[in-house]
Amino acid sequence: MIPLRFLPLPLVAALATGSVLRAAEPIDFNRQILPILSDACFHCHGPDAATREAKLRLDQRDGLFRTRDEVSVVTPGHPAKSELFLRITSKEEDEVMPPPKATRRLKPAEIELLKQWISDGAPWSTHWAFSPPQRVPVPALRGDRESEGQRDGGNRQAPPSLRLATNPIDAFVRTALTKAGLTPAPAADPATLLRRVSLDLTGVPPSPAELDAYLADQTPGVYERAVERLLASPRYGERWAWDWLDLARYADTNGFQGDPERTMWPWRDWVVNALNANMPYDQFTIEQLAGDLLPDATREQKLASGFHRNNMFNGEGGRIAEETRVENVFDRVETTATVWMGLTFTCARCHDHKFDPIKQTDYFALYDIFNQMSETGSASGGGGRSGAIAPVLDLSTAEEQAAVTRAQAGIDAIAKEIELFELTKFPRPEGKPVIDSPAAQRLPGNLPATHARPAVNRRDLNGLLEALPFFRDTEPDPDYVKLLQKHIAAIRVRDRATNNITRVMIMDEMPKKRDTFVLSKGNYESKTDVKVLGAIPEIFRSHEAGAAAPSPRNVAENRGEGGASSSAEAPRLNRLDLARWLVSPGNPLAARTAVNRAWQAFFGTGIVKTPEDFGVQSGSPSHPELLDWLATEFVASGWDMKNLHRLIVTSATYRQSSRVTPALHERDPENRLLARGPRHRQPSWMLRDQALAAAGLLVEQLGGPSVKPYQPAGIWEEATFGKKSYQQDHGEALYRRSLYVFWRRIVGPTTFFDAGARQVCTVKVPHTNTPLHALVTLNDPAFVEAARVMAQRALTGADRTDSARLDTVFRRATARIPTPKEKSILLARLATLRGQFGASPVEAHQLASIGEFERPESVPVVEHAAWTALCSLILNLDEALSKE
């Protein structure tokens, strides 16, 4: 048997979908032929006119079946009469395709597949992602209504609602497994399953009390009730917000040199609240893309539009403002295309796409939509924190405004003292300003300009700081210097109060529209004469796409208030038009991309393995009918995200054991066929939350400003050339969920490995496995302190024996008690640790004192250190680090 990894990609895709080439089963053009043509032919014979040769397009039906001078590119049913087949099999260097200089060569299996396709009549269709999802009938399964081994938690008979055939997901998956000659795995045991679904839905493991209650409940529907409890938990929104923050490129700073702070956490809290409230995904979309354009937009809807202000902002000295503004628009176009269309629009910034039917004019049609906000590219105008760039939404509290008022009153008071003093220091006619005094006019440098303004309006600290040494050293006046020092101190108090006002960057729309021109090679200075108006991509307006995509005119006419102009010639779409189109039947990709990302979160890999790319270079769907069924079900449910998650986690497919035999692993190493349950290492942010929860340290406070937990010294200083210094928080802030950790753009939190950089939209964070990860989970103060607190709770709790204490800590990390063999190994390790720390009491004290959580003096130091090391070992077990 040939291992899957040695088979050509299209054949692997065929195996994954159970559509291996058989005499009785037709070749699927989309999943088997199009990937070959795209890989080997489209660079020279595809959408990009600039690199197209022989005026031949193989990405379109007309080109593929073109006949010219009695020569047909493809003659259905006749490979020998098809120029395409003749060229790919030619032995002549000047005729063979791809040409000898090409880096991509066709494999024999691919040539045979193309030959068979032509022989079968060369059926053709649009790339699957560009056609609307089809709600195919749920497959009917033969045989037992309940799959072997499918029991609720392994020891309770599954009620009829949980049988394999009654969850549509299971029907689709079981059909594919049957075609592949495989059977599903038995159900995971109850404790493992509860831990899995708790981590997936809330990001934290079940508490011992929750686990006890679940295992004690023997009544039908216990699992469904657990799922409903988790979906209703405030922790649900916090867990699912993380993935959204990755794709929204959320951070607490602007990035680039200096990396100034910004206040975007209220938008982050909006996301958490929206997810917890189960806001429909279409509304979730519209409010984030265009909440500010909705009729009578509320403050919350305007806040939601901060989604597209999460991008990096280059405010470096000497930076050209227009270049920054244009790059920000680029980012918004490409993020929108990735999130709601799953398309790689970046290629079309400089030229027509090489593989997908996306023109450069399509790119700039979307660019025009995002080109109409008042942002200038200048790092100013936001007020408050230095990183806030206009337009902003004032979310200041009464306390914040009161602090500004008090600070301004302090400035007013000292200004009056200064003005009174300056009547004699700078003599001039009554009623005249200070600058009219000859004494003021002869001041050096910028001091005359400073004194040209009344004291209450002297806001330039540089001018006041210049005055200090002059009146202290050059023309000494101690009384005046004291007044200047008080004035400077008062201004600094006012500036701090102003900077502390909560202002969030949001979107807006200019009354007068900017003209948009295609930029040559994406260069902000190189405008062409091609003017573009806001519109949806042409592929979704063409009849060829097979989608009922509304034209720009239809979107404008059906828009109602807050939309674009109703120009008779070419309606110009705005953000609200675009947002509504993205979640309309005209866009075949919004629902697909959303359900695929959800599937990826639960199973580790999406039905489409490339969530960022649904174009012709994408990975073929492992279960295409299931993807479309889920997409149509998602829309039919009212874009109900919790319903989608409920449907997935209550399936027997999700509830399978993740154990795998060597034979199955050889057959399907990535679990694309889903003959077993999901198993993969938890993301680093979830590992931190799990450790805090296992130790009983996790502070379950929703929302608020970002916090700064433990971090090695000098990280910020090195990254910012000493301009930023990390000021660690204390108390409960150390134990907040990872979602709330302050994220500096140029150097993210050091605890989070394999995390998105939060610089661009990220819909798939890579999973790696290196020893560096263990350096974090074994040594980071957050993890060591969690182990230390786990140990002290075990030592001060009700358990009085090593065996009972070991059961408690092991269960907190893994949701089960250790086996007798595991217990023997761990107790032996505990004895060794006692001996080692008994011989090194200083090291024992150091380990038992890590972290700020109070250590009871009643706990013997050596015993505490030994149990701390043992708890750290348990938290680092593969089982504890993984969701299985």
Image (cartoon, rainbow, N blue to C red):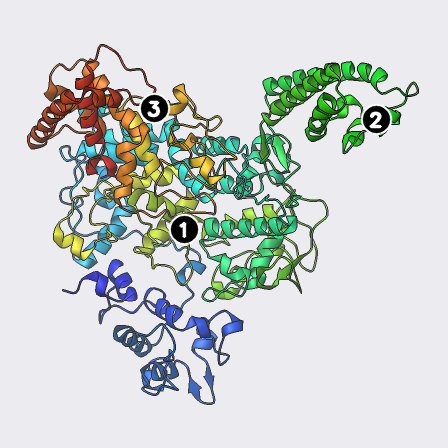
Q: Looking at numbered disc 1 in the image, what kind of residue is underneath it? A: Arg
Q: Earlier in the sequence, mark 3 or mark 1?
A: 1
Q: Which residue is mark 3?
A: 698
Per the model, the C-alpha gap separating discs 3 and 1 is 35 Å
Mark 1 neighbour density, 10 Å: few (under 14) some (14–19) many (20 or more): many
Q: Is residue 600 above or below residue 466?
A: below
Q: Residue at x 59, y 43 (%)?
A: 315
Q: Is residue 134 shown to the viewer in this render?
A: yes
- The type of residue carrying mark 2 is Ala
Task: Look at the image and tell me whether residue 558 can be seen.
Answer: no
Q: Which residue carries the number 1 mark?
A: 592
At which x and y percent is residue 553?
63, 55
Q: Residue at x 88, y 19 (%)?
A: 427
Q: Secondary structure at mark 3?
A: loop
- Closer to the camera in the image, 735 or 414: 414
Q: Nearer the viewer, residue 601 or 158?
A: 601
Q: Earlier in the sequence, mark 2 or mark 1?
A: 2
Tell whether label 3 touches label 2 (CB within 8 Å): no
